[in-house]
Image (cartoon, grey):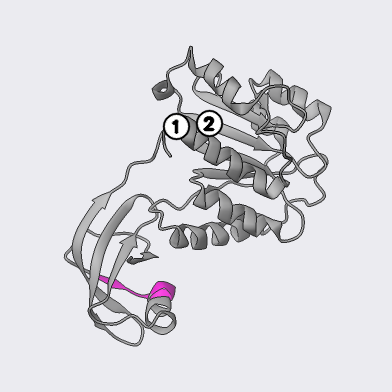
Amino acid sequence: MRTLFFIDSLPEADLITVSGDEANHALKVLRLGVGDEITLSDGNGKWAHCRINSTTKRDFLAGVLESGEEEVNKPKLKVVQAIPKSDRWREMVELLVESGVYEILPWNSARGIAKSQSDTKSKWEVAAFAAAKQSRRYFIPKISEPINLNNFIKDLPENKKEQIIFVMHESADAKLSTVFKNIFDSVKLEDVSEILIVIGPEGGITDQELSDLKVAGGHVVKLGRPVYRSAHAASAALAAISALIGRW
């Protein structure tokens, strides 16, 4: 299988020069050379299957064999994730990217031990970039600036049918699959632009946060009897929803 490399833009040309960190990784780490086939992408859906035609110490020239553009899957799957403690954020980002997330919104939750830092967004972006390469995704998932729940709720669309919100909570009475079926008995999937998954911290979502999310249209659900770590819950929810909407 071809290794994926990201470049800033993908020109409509028969030959593409690749330089910088991606060229260094291809030539010095992976030891790729003339004749090897790779895939290039701009991280926004465009892709090109290529063969390396020539190399220098700093770059290589790739001949395009086939190219195309992948459309963004709709509804977009977004995750509001309470910031995990320690280094669990890295594993969390990797799992979400592999599970098909469109955007991750770091959340400074009330009970979260870890809080956002000045470099939270940039660190998560680096992890998302690497995970997108590993999972061979042509879209690099977006990482938002860390959010405050009240401000985030104020910016939600007024038409609640355009964005379905699922709040994962271990004490919920209803299962995700049951609530999902009830929602889409009256709402057409093609009319929904986004499905938003909210994941609390290890200490749980506070009653006030839960109330605010419900008022904003959130559906409080559980995945099942087992309780997930905060850093793992969203990937399980993404997998379940991907299957329910027919993406998996």
Whether residue 237 sits left or right of residue 53 in the image: it is: right
Q: Is residue 170 above or below residue 4?
A: above
Q: Is residue 217 above or below residue 227?
A: above
Residue type at the position of mark 1? Pro
Residue at 66% x, 21% y: name it.
216
Q: Residue 243 in the image: x percent, y percent?
A: 47, 35
Query: Mark 2, residues whose alpha carbon is within 10 Å: few (<14), some, or many (≥20)?
Result: many
Q: Is residue 67 above or below residue 235?
A: below
Q: Residue 98 in the image: x percent, y percent?
A: 50, 52
- Residue situated in front as seen by the camera: 129 or 233: 233
Mark 1 — residue? 75
Q: How many marks?
A: 2
Residue 219 magenta-highlighted: no
Q: Quadrant of residue 176?
A: top right
Q: Is residue 159 visible?
A: no
Magenta-drawn segment:
16-22
Q: Is residue 239 visible?
A: yes
Residue at 78% x, 52% y: name it.
114
Residue located farthest toward the front when viewing the structure as drawn:
225
Residue 18 magenta-highlighted: yes
Mark 2 — residue? 195
* Cβ atoms under marks 2 and 1 closer than 8 Å: yes
Res 98 label: none
Residue at 57% x, 33% y: name it.
196
Q: Residue 69 in the image: x percent, y percent?
A: 28, 48
Q: Residue 50 in the image: x percent, y percent?
A: 24, 67
Q: Quadrant of the N terminus?
A: bottom left
Residue type at the position of mark 2? Ile
Whether residue 195 sits left or right of residue 63 in the image: it is: right
Q: Quadrant of residue 40?
A: bottom left
